[in-house]
Every structure is written in structure tokens, then in C-alpha cells.
Image (tube, rainbow, N blue to C red):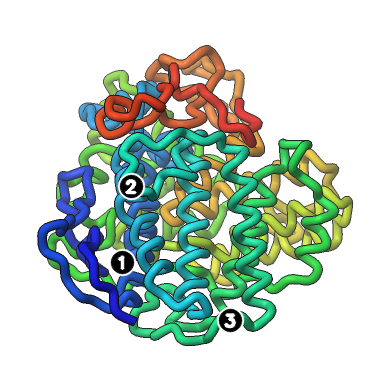
Amino acid sequence: MKLKKAIYSTALAVLFSATSCEKWLDINHTPNNPETVKASSLLSGIQVSAGYTLMSWDYLFNAGVYNQYITQRYGNSQFKKTEKFETEDFAYAYRNFFTGQLVEAQALKDNSEETSGYAFVSEIMQIFVWQNVVDTWGNVPYFEALDSKNITPKFDKAEDIYKDLLSRIDKAIDNYNSGFYNDDIDKKVDFVYSGSFSDWGKFANSLKLKLMHRLSNVADYYRNESLLDFVSNAEFIDKTAQISENIWESKSTKKYPADEYEGGQFFSNNVLPSRTLVNYMSSGNDPRLAVYFTKNNSDIYAGKLQGYFEVNEDDKTGAFSAVNLSGMPKNIPLMSVWEIDFDIAEVYLRASNNEKAKEYYEKAVLESLKYWGLSDASDITGENGYAKWDNPDFEKGLELISLQRWVSFFMTQHAEAFFERNRTGYPQLSDITDLTQLQENFPAGKFIMTLAGSVLPKGVLPLSPIYPETGVAALNPNCVQKSSMAEKIFWQKGN
């Protein structure tokens, strides 16, 4: 299986061209130097680039602020504009998605036998990337996007893209189940499942579940009875699909993304844990606190008020916790077991099957703990746990699932946390804006409006970035730029 063409990047060039202070994960274009490589060798590059993009600059820091995982440290200014919800376009992610993963997945698919396992995995990975593209920006070029001769592709409606993605995933799963594809994936180039074709089949089912589930607020597309039938009969991932921490190296440009940025001291100099996350977890002595954060000088976990930039000497003397970069796993999940278990729990909740909802909710929490090397969930879901499932009504159940989903995605799946908060509306936005009240009686389990002040309408949090100005809006006349980051994507519940 040979590929003779000018390729956009070889397998790991996408990953190892990052620099500590540079937002752009450079794509290594070689149009004037065609080379012959195995098509299969593109797979690892697609996988690693996707993982790196989803936990790199735009989602790591910007979405980290929007998710109220982190906030700007007093005395620095790197993310002050982000705290005020000033315009972001997520251009770094947009470029990597389109010129890296989508193009290479298409190249892998085009240069694989139709019945090859690589054709199946490249199709599934491309659908996965498209899901993230649409969930981030909404309407984007899709049907004409990968036509190299068309430099001004039309923008397609997000709803139409979703319909096509669901059709594509159905066809791929049907072909998989019928034995159409060969199990011929070389474990050496598969950084996610080491060539396990059965795991990729489960990944495809899980991706379909995610696509269907994202439409929970869209009556024209969402049918919970279809989801209920699906979760009752399909097999879903039982191993988190992730880029393993084992591939990172200690040398510059080959580190885990957060460590790479910390080379420029972006964490230690610029951000602190948000009180929003820390207080909710502290309210129930969540065991993940010890692996998420370090304690402050008073030997407790303490987060900083979101977007509070006033002079605060305590900020300089160790009053706040720090993100525990040295003590956490350095994997990058593309799709986690706990993510899918939370989705299944919500499907059963919507079907009024409280027993099954409880089962999958508790399993999801435990799977999150296992990822962090923990095993005791009693402080969370036990008899006296702070997030115990106690035969809740629908809204309370949805809130429990959503809050624990939000907690579990810290430093693993920031993009998903952003999407899911905008889908469910949980954590809810508190109406408390008085500084004294926030300092004395913080509303645990709720977001607060950034104290930095917002350029968005009152009570509105970011819903989607605008389109990249330089590479998209300025060059493609078909791009109708958004007026602000308050523009909803069709499936969003919003604020």
C-alpha cells in the first residue's frame, strides 16, 4: 500500500514542530518534494495531531477559562482578554483540523483498499474530527472542503453536516458488522488501540452515540427511543481512546502539550485554578483534588475568583493552589470511557430508567477516578457522597451527570467540557455578582460571571468562537463572519 504524492505532513511532523511559546503547531508542507511513504504511516500522525490539537492552546487555555477550570493570575495579562470573553477565533485548532487531520485522513482513505481496516479507521477518525470542527464553529465548509482545486469552498449548515456524519457513521458501522473490512492494522502505526480492530468497532459505536446524543435539544433530529435501543444492543469503548503519555519526551518540542507551554511558564506565571472548580470539588472532599491541584501555603485547596484582577497580595504569597502538572497523567483522551458512560446514563435518565442511569453514572465517576490512579468513589457517589445519585427527578439527574462530567474533563477533554456545558446549560450560571457575597458564600456547583467584565450581552457566556480572520474570513467570500462569540450552534441550549 504505497502513497506517491505530495503529502501535507509525515506521521509525526505535525506533533514535533510545536514550540513552547508558539501558538501554531506547524504543519510541515512539502509540495515541491514528493515522497513515497506507506499510506498506513499517516495514521499515527492523524491520531497524534488530533489529540494535540484538542488539548493544546485554544482548548487548553481558552476553553480552560470558559470552562472555569483556570483563571488569570493577578499581575499577568496573557489571558485577560480571554477572561473578558473578547473575540477568539481558535485559528490554531482550525488550521490543524483542516490542513492536518482531515486532509491526511482523506489521503489515507483514498490510498487504502476499500475493504482495508485503514479505510475504516480513517473514515471514523475523519468523522471524529468533523464532529469537533462543527461543534466548535457551527457552519463550516464541508462538502467542498477537501477539494484541493477549490480555494473558496461554500459554507454548509451545521445541521446538514451532522445529518451526513450520521449517515456516514451508520454506513461504516454496518460495513464493520457485516465483516466487510479486513483486520489489517499494523499496531506500530496505531497509537490509540495498537491495531485492535474490535476496539475500533467500539469506538465507532461510541462516536455514533456522541453524535446522536449531542442533538438532545433538537426535536427534529433527536429520538431518545432510538438511542435507548442503540445503547441496549451495541458495544461501546471499554478502553479510553487516547494518545499515551509514553510517546512524549523530555526535550523541547517533544513534550506533552501542557509541559511544552510550561516551558514558557504559561501555567506558573499566568494561570491559577478557578474557585468555581475547586470549591465544588472541595464541597465534597473529592479525591481528585489531590491529583488535579497542589495545596496552598495554608495546606488547603484554594482557587481564585474567575476574572478577578484587583490587587491581591495573597496572590503573590501562595494563598492559591496550582495546577499539579508534575503529578498528573500525560495522556490525551480522544474519547474516554467515562464520557460514554455519562452519555449512556443520560440516555437512561431520559427514559426514566433511574436504576440504569444510576449504574452508568456511578461507573462513569469510578472510571474517571481510575484514570487518575484512584479507586474510592465513596466521597462522591457513596451513601454520604457530595454527588450521590438519590433517585433524582430529570433536571436534578441531568445536573448531577453534567457536573461530574465537567469535573472529569479537567486536563483531559476541555473541548468536550465546553461543548457539553453549552448543550446542557450545566453548570448553571449563578446570578450572584457581588464580590463580597462571592468571597464569603461562593455558589458551589455553579459558574459565576467573570469579574473582569464581559464584552458579551449580560448573562451570556461564550458559545462558539468566530471564524479565523486571517486564514478564512479574509480569503473566502463565502464566509459570513459571526458578530460575536454569543452565536449559538444549532444543537446548543446556551446560557
Q: Give the image quarter of residue 74.
A: top left
- Residue toward you, 382 or 107: 107
Against 450, residue 315 (above or below) is: below
- Residue toward you, 9 or 326: 9
- Of badges 2 and 3, the one in the foreground is 3
Quadrant position of the N terminus in the picture: bottom left
Residue for point 81% across, 59% down? 228
Q: Distance between the residues labelled 1 and 2?
A: 32 Å
Residue for point 53% across, 13% down? 458
For marks 1 and 2 on the same chain, the one whose residue lies earlier in the sequence: 1
Instruction: Determine if residue 319 is in view.
Output: no
Give percent across and percent down for residue 406: 56, 47
Left or right: 470 in relation to 402: left
**Badge 2: residue crowd in 10 Å (few <14, some 14–19, many ≥20):** many
Q: What residue type is labelled 1?
A: Gly
Give percent across and percent down for residue 323: 35, 50
Q: How far apart are marks 1 and 3 (CA)?
A: 21 Å
- Residue toward you, 339 or 16: 16
For marks 2 and 3 on the same chain, the one whose residue lies earlier in the sequence: 3
- Look at mark 3 in the image and give the residue it sits on: 198
- Look at mark 1 in the image and give the residue it sits on: 45
Q: What residue type is labelled 3?
A: Ser
For marks 1 and 3 on the same chain, the one whose residue lies earlier in the sequence: 1
- Look at mark 2 in the image and give the residue it sits on: 322
Residue 450's tag is none
Q: Which amino acid does label 2 sit on?
A: Ala
Quadrant position of the C terminus in the picture: top right
Give percent across and percent down for residue 434: 51, 15
What is the secondary structure assignment of the residue under circle 2? strand
Against 334, residue 421 (above or below) is: above
Against 165, residue 77 (above or below) is: above
- Of badges 1 and 2, the one in the foreground is 1
